[in-house]
Image: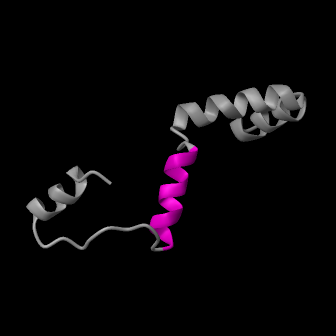
Amino acid sequence: MSTRDSLLQEISMMTDEQCSAILGMIHAFVGMPNAETLAAIDDAEHGRNLSGPFETVDALMEDLNADD
C-alpha cells in the first residue's frame, strides 16, 4: 500500500474533530496565509487597492512611509 493510500485510510477512520485538528496542523506546517494576507492576494490578483507605479525608490519609500 502506498503512503498516500495509508494516509487516506487513516483519515477515513477519523472523526470530523480529529480531521479539523490535523488540517490545522497541516496549515501551520505549510504556512497557510491568514485572512488579511488572503485578502491582499485577492486584491492583487484582481487589480484592487494597488499603489504606484513609482518612478524611483525614493518615491516608493515616501508612499510607504506616508500617514494614510
**Residue 9 appears at what percent x and percent y?**
84, 34
- At x 80%, y 38%, the residue is 8
The quarter holding residue 32 reads: top right
Taking the view exactly as shown, the residue that stands out farthest to the front is: 67
Considering the whole magenta stretch, tell me its main secondary structure.
helix
Q: Say left or right for 29 vs 24.
A: left
Of 26 and 47, nearer the camera is: 47
Q: Residue at 9% across / 60% down in the picture?
A: 58
Asked if residue 67 is among those painted magenta in the image, a careful observer would answer no
Where is residue 57 shown, x and y percent of the image? 11, 61
Residue shown at 52% from the left, 47% from the top: 36
How many numbered markers are drawn? 0
The magenta-colored residue range is 35-46
Q: Position of residue 56 (x, y in %)?
A: 10, 67
- Rendered-image quadrant of the C terminus: bottom left
Image height check: is 13 above or below 54?
A: above
